[in-house]
Image: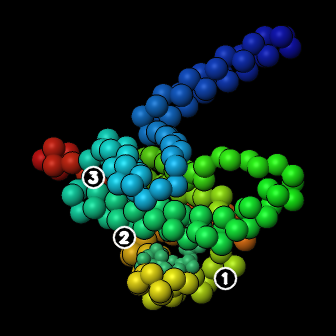
Amino acid sequence: MNSKTEEQNFIQKMREREAYGKRNDKEHNEMQIEFDAVSINEAFARTAVASFLTPLNPTLEEISDVKTAVSEAVTNAVIHGYDEEYFKQYRIRTEDQGEEKQTKPKVYIHCVLDGDVLHVEIWDKGKGIANIELAMEPLYTSKPEQDRSGMGFAFMEAFMDDLEVISEPGYGTTVLMKKKVGVSSWIDEE
Ligand SMILES: Nc1ncnc2c1ncn2[C@@H]1O[C@H](COP(=O)(O)OP(=O)(O)OP(=O)(O)O)[C@@H](O)[C@H]1O
Ligand SMILES: [Mg+2]
């Protein structure tokens, strides 16, 4: 009796898992990339995310919004995350440890398509942000001498549905963005 129930439970669990797997294949898709933190890779990054988005039938405007937001976040990682200050600290750190680790700084992107929502996570292991609230204020820039306009976060906020910034000085910065994409294709609307 008992073993029968266990068997039934097992079959039930397997069916649920199978159903979840099927649901998952259709509605959940994931990718992750990692590349050297150099500005020439910014074009690659925004194109990669835009290509990943195509199953959702995005409009040209949605593609352009996502590309702009990705561009801004990646540029920030390259320019601010791994700036001179980072390299100075990095040198001190590695000298302290008595070893010269020569790994090139990287930028990481993780994307998830969950139904019709794109989740993008872009992070660096750079110098981090001490005051996130201030950094996110429109027109604030810590590099006015480099003709930065301080509008990167404002653009990310404007072009995406949700923006969250997590950062720890000395450890890096993570930007999390969400956007609902491709409400329906013209075929579905007929
Ligand atoms: N990944 C990061 N690591 C460290 N600091 C960052 C990072 N991203 C942003 N910041 C800080 O936040 C500030 C504001 O960023 P934002 O992108 O809004 O403006 P900006 O990069 O200075 O100028 P713009 O993006 O208009 O060229 C930056 O000046 C920098 O001090
Ligand atoms: Mg910026």
21 sits left or right of 130 in the view? left
Label 1 near ligand 1 (CB < 8 Å): no
The secondary element bearing badge 1 is classed as loop
Q: Give whichever of discs 2 and 3 has the lower sequence position.
A: 3
Which of label 1 and label 2 is nearer to you? 1
- Which residue is the site of mark 3? 58
The amino acid sitting under disc 3 is Pro
Which of label 1 and label 3 is nearer to you? 1
Residue nearest the observer in this picture, 116 or 152: 152
The amino acid sitting under disc 2 is Phe
Q: At which x and y percent is residue 121?
A: 54, 56
Residue nearest the observer in this picture, 158 or 97: 97
Q: Alpha-carbon distance for marks 2 and 3?
A: 14 Å
Q: At which x and y percent is residue 110?
A: 53, 48
Q: Alpha-carbon distance for marks 1 and 3?
A: 35 Å
- Which residue is the site of mark 1? 131
Q: At which x and y percent is residue 10?
A: 72, 18
The secondary element bearing badge 2 is classed as helix
Q: Residue at x 47, y 56 (%)?
A: 38
Vertical side of 179 occupied by 115: above or below: above
Q: Give whichever of discs 1 and 3 has the lower sequence position.
A: 3
The amino acid sitting under disc 1 is Asn
Residue 154 in view of the camera: no
The secondary element bearing badge 3 is classed as loop
